[in-house]
Amino acid sequence: MARPTHPSEIRGMFGPKGDSEEWLDATGRFPNGVPRFESRDECLEFMEEYNTYHGGSNPDMPQLMHIFTMLTSWEQIEKILIPNIEKARTEPGSRNKVPKDYLEGDLPENSKNVF
């Protein structure tokens, strides 16, 4: 496998910028943008091609070339994952909010309200 020409990136997990445009382009052909393969060889071919031009999957360990970033220490979890989870929790969600008064009042017995 050739050495990557780009710096490593965080893939498939919370990161400061989310997944790179290159990764999103490369995985756009898969359902939900999640890589799926019929065989091990197909997976290896995809990743060898991607990693040749786009770098590894761990910013601190550029030799790692996984489909998704694998954090290798508690220090990385504290430095990369936890702060980005906390940041994501402050951002507005894409789903409609359930009103806080959804259980108030009389609901019909056959209500489709599942909350």
Image: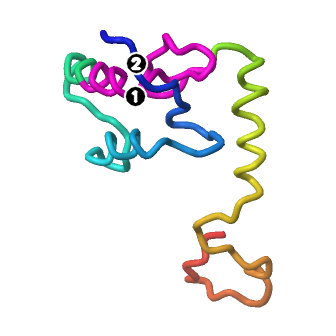
- Looking at the rendered structure, the secondary structure element under dot 2 is loop
Amino acid marked by disc 2: Pro
| Residue 108 numbered mark, or none | none
Label 1 belongs to which residue?
A: 54
Side of 103 where 62 appears, left or right: left
Question: Which quarter of the figure has residue 115?
Answer: bottom right
Cβ atoms under marks 1 and 2 closer than 8 Å: yes
SS assignment for the magenta stretch, majority: loop
| Residue 97, magenta (yes or no) | no
Question: Which quarter of the figure has residue 43?
Answer: top left
| Residue 59, magenta (yes or no) | yes
Quarter in which the N terminus is drawn: top left
Q: Residues within 10 Å of mark 1 (few under 14, many from 20)?
A: many
Q: Position of residue 28 (x, y in %)?
A: 32, 48
| Magenta stretch in the rendered image | 46-71
Label 2 belongs to which residue?
A: 4
